Each structure stands twice: as C-alpha cells, then as structure tokens.
Image (tube, rainbow, N blue to C red):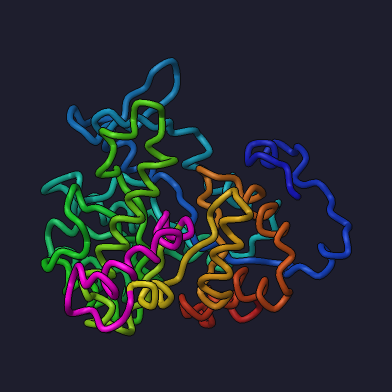
Amino acid sequence: MLAASPMAALEGGPKSSADNSPAAAQRPSSSIDCQSHLFAPEIVALMEKRRTDPRVFTRDGVRYVQMGGWFRKIQPYYLNVNAKLATMNANRIAMTTLSINDPEPEWFGRKGPTVAQLANDFVAGVVRKHPARFFGLCVLPLQNLKASHMELDRCVRRLGMKGILLYTNLAGKFPDEPEFRPLFARAVELDLPVLLHPAKPVTIDFVKGYEMTSSLGNMFDNTIALTRLIMSGLLDQFPKLKLVCPHLGGTLPYIIGRLDHQTQVLKRGPKYLTRPPSEYLRQIWLDIVSPLPLAMRFGHEFMGAERLLFASDHPWVEPEIILKAFHSLQLLVADQVKIFSANARRLFNLGNLPGGNKL
C-alpha cells in the first residue's frame, strides 16, 4: 500500500503510493500505533562509556548495541523523532505509543534507577514537544522495587505516562515471579496498561547461530512470559489488569489448545486456575505486528476485533508492511475502526490528550 522509507520521507522522496480502490475509500483515515520505539540518545551515550554489557561500540562508522553475543545496529533514524513523524505522516498514523528500545534498566545493575529516569525523561520530552502525536510508556528499574514505585508515581503524576513497558524477562527473571506482584497491583490501582515487550531472549544461545534472535528468540520470549503469567494465576488475582502482548502473542494463540488439554483434560499444571488458559488469553490485548495476513486473520478470529490493536514495531518494522498485510484481510469497517484506533483510545484513556477525542 505505502512504500517509503523514513529517510526518503525526510529527504523529500516519495512518501506513499496511491491506493484508489473502493476498499481503500472505506478505510479509517487515521490510526493509533500501539508499539513504536526510539533509542534515547542519553542512554546510548552512557552505553558508549561502558566497558561491560550492555555497551555501545562503533565499527566502520556504524554503532552497535552489544549484549553478550547479541549485536544490533543503531541506525541514525532510530534516534530521530522527525524521521518517526515522517513515517507516521506517510502512513496516516495519527498518534503513536512511544517507548524506548531495550536494553532495559534491569541490565544496568545499581544504575538501573538512573537509566530508567533518563529513558522516561526522554520519552516525556518527546511527548511534550508533540502532544497531539505521541503518548508515552514508562520503564521501571525492577531490580529495585522501592525505586520502581517511586519512578512509576513520578511518571504518572509528573510526566503523564499512559502505561508501563514491562520486559518479557528482567535480566533473566520472569515477570510472573512473586516479587513483581506489587507492580501489577499498582498498575491496576492506576488503571495503567502493561505492555509485555521482548527483551534479550532467554533462548538466545539456541537461536543466535542463524540470526534468529529477533525472528524466533523474541517470539519465544513473548510466548514463555505470557504463558507463565497466565499459568501463575495473575489474571485471577488481578482481573482488571490491562495486559497487552505484542506480535500477536508470539506463538501462544497457536498452541493454546495444548495448554487447555494439559490443564483441563490431563489435569497437569497449576490446580488453582479457575478457567481454561484460552479464556485468560482472550482477556489480554494483542497487537497485530506480523507480516503474515493469515496470522492476523487467525488472531482476529480467535481474539475478536475488540482485543486487537494496530501497531508497527517501528523502526524495526516499517508500518506499510503491517498495513498492507492487514488491509488484505478486508475486514468489516467497524472492526477496522476498533483495531486501528477505538480499542487503543479506550485502553490508554486517550480522551484527555490533545486530539484524542478526534481519533
């Protein structure tokens, strides 16, 4: 549908290719992107001074983040707010949920609270400059629960954050572990969505040989963390928790029948669940980041339009890829409206934001 890189848009190149089909005329005119990231320049600069992971180094003029055997490029536009705005404009994205790229604060040890503050101040600064285009998710230094609670209160009361970015593993710990339950309790009290985002995957040693860390490792991290949260009884303890899982839930929707069979028929697993795992899964929100239309269709049929959110995962994925795949499904316009904006507006309480009631 749309074919423009962020840099082409910034340089005045072609921003989109016209789509004049009858179906296009019925599409919603704007959307809310529920997963989009920027590197915080202050944190990149901090990592450039480090001699231990996570660190940033430059090779042949290109900067890389290193975490053990995992290396990722930091392209210039990964830090560029104007590049992101150009991409949003080219793809008719009205507002974007903004969060930092990992590594998350937990990997910085005792400096975690400082890193979290740098990250959250950066995101809040972008939102202040563009209040009609962005709203922020905060990160927390969960190796220090006291500091995390203080930072969460600061982010909500002073910075106006609209949700929490929670990583699928917290420097190796999973978020279902008992020590993190107070975080979920506080999120419910504050009515804040919690977006479960993959970090350096726990399976990295098994997937890095063929550059599968992002394609498989991150999806397995989504799957493992979300499954553990469901099986832990968290959603019975906190039934009002607004939990969001990106990337169509990793692989969990496709294997959830096995969990139902194991728990309900074979009576394996936790005995305190009050419902089949598939019923808990259906009370979670999933974003539609996948280049495969069939995966989106399955997500729509399994979850229903009320539990899906449009997202791009920009800058790692160009929005046009997700949009082209989604539009090929030719869903009812009412379902498109829910997925593109209505669900996000309700989930993140966007009515009090500039332009929020117009989406």
- Between 284 and 56, the one lying in front of the other is 284
Residue 51 relative to residue 325: left or right:
left
User: Looking at the image, is 134 positioned above or below residue 264?
Assistant: above
Query: Toward which corner of the image does residue 239 lie, by quadrant?
Result: bottom left
Which quarter of the figure is the C terminus placed in?
Answer: bottom right
Residue 170 relative to residue 81: left or right:
left
Query: Toward which corner of the image does residue 20 lie, by quadrant?
Result: bottom right
**Where is residue 40 drawn, in percent x and y?**
38, 46
Q: Tell me, yes or no, whether the highlighted magenta stretch contains residue 263.
A: yes
Residue 354 relative to residue 261: left or right:
right
Q: Residue at x 53, y 48 (%)?
A: 314
Residue 81 relative to residue 27: left or right:
left
- Between 180 and 118, the one lying in front of the other is 180
**Where is residue 341 drawn, in percent x and y?**
60, 72
Q: Residue at x 38, y 54 (%)?
A: 122
Q: How many marks?
A: 0
Query: Toward which corner of the image does residue 260 lie, by quadrant?
Result: bottom left
Q: Residue at x 60, y 70 (%)?
A: 339
**Where is residue 106 drawn, in percent x and y?**
19, 50
Q: Which residues are magenta?
A: 247-276
User: Looking at the image, is 91 positioned above or below residue 245?
Assistant: above
* Residue 345 in view (yes/no): yes
* Residue 150 in view (yes/no): no
Q: Residue at x 77, y 47 (%)?
A: 16
Q: Residue furthest front?
A: 266
**Where is residue 161 drawn, in percent x and y?**
38, 69
